[in-house]
Image (cartoon, grey):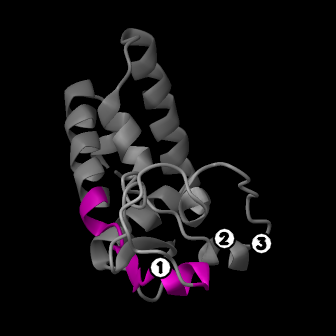
């Protein structure tokens, strides 16, 4: 209820708390470990050869075609480490899968359920939006706390 309180300092402090709570309650990423042969479905040369080669073109945006279905998206391998494969490939590649555990009403923690119930209340959301607009009119700068509250990071 402090998100819709008359005092703007309380609303700001509550936004920080909710931002932190959302970051803590975020489901963890699921990682997979595979060898390069499992990803490419062919044998590779494991010697040190710097530069662009046939075995590392898949990590560039060379001929990337975005996935069209949810299944294709979940099977796409995005490698976050740009240095892998430029000189030599590691023996095992660890990368995040494109799927996460999603909370449902039955399996969400109690803290998340409280937030879920509050933001499902249309009257609360309408008041919250009014106060957000009011706060934005008084302060024209970017609010990173509010951004993190909605982004969850």
Residue drawn at 29 percent across, 68 percent down:
25
The nearer-to-camera label among 3 and 1 is 1
- Please state the horizontal and vertical placement of residue 64, each as a whole percent of the image: 71, 55
Which range is magenta? 23-42
On whether residue 143 falls in the magenta region, the answer is: no
For label 3, count other residues whose C-alpha is less than 10 Å away and answer few (under 14), some (14-19) or many (20+). Answer: few
Whether tag 3 and tag 2 are in contact, CB under 8 A, the answer is yes
Drawn side of residue 3 relative to residue 14, left or right = right
Quadrant of residue 88 in the image?
Answer: bottom left
For label 2, count other residues whose C-alpha is less than 10 Å away and answer few (under 14), some (14-19) or many (20+). Answer: some
Disc number placed over residue 73 in the picture, else none: 2
From this view, report whether residue 34 is shown above or below residue 7: below
- Please state the horizontal and vertical placement of residue 14, each as a whole percent of the image: 24, 43
Mark 3 or mark 1: which comes first in sequence? 1
From this view, report whether residue 102 is shown above or below residue 68: below
Residue drawn at 32 percent across, 79 percent down:
109
Secondary structure category for the residue under label 3 = loop
Mark 2 or mark 1: which comes first in sequence? 1
Say which residue label 3 marks. Answer: 69
Whether tag 2 and tag 1 are in contact, CB under 8 A, the answer is no
Drawn side of residue 29 relative to residue 9, left or right = right
Say which residue label 1 marks. Answer: 36
Residue drawn at 45 percent across, 67 percent down:
117
The nearer-to-camera label among 2 and 1 is 1
On whether residue 31 falls in the magenta region, the answer is: yes
Marks 2 and 1, how far apart at CA: 19 Å
């Amino acid at each position: 209820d402090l998100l819709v309180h008359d005092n703007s300092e309380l609303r700001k402090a509550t936004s920080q708390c909710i931002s932190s709570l959302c970051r803590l309650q975020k489901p963890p990423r699921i990682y997979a470990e595979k060898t390069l042969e499992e990803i490419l479905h062919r044998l590779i040369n494991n010697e040190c050869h710097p530069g662009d080669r046939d075995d590392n073109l898949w990590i560039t945006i060379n001929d990337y075609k975005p996935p069209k279905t949810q299944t294709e998206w979940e099977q796409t391998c995005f490698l976050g480490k740009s240095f892998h494969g430029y000189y030599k490939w590691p023996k095992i590649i660890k990368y995040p899968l494109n799927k996460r555990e999603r909370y449902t009403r039955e399996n969400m923690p109690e803290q998340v359920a409280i937030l879920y119930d509050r933001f499902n209340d249309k009257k609360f959301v309408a008041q919250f939006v009014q106060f957000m607009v009011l706060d934005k009119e008084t302060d024209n700068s970017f609010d990173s706390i509010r951004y993190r509250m909605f982004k969850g990071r």
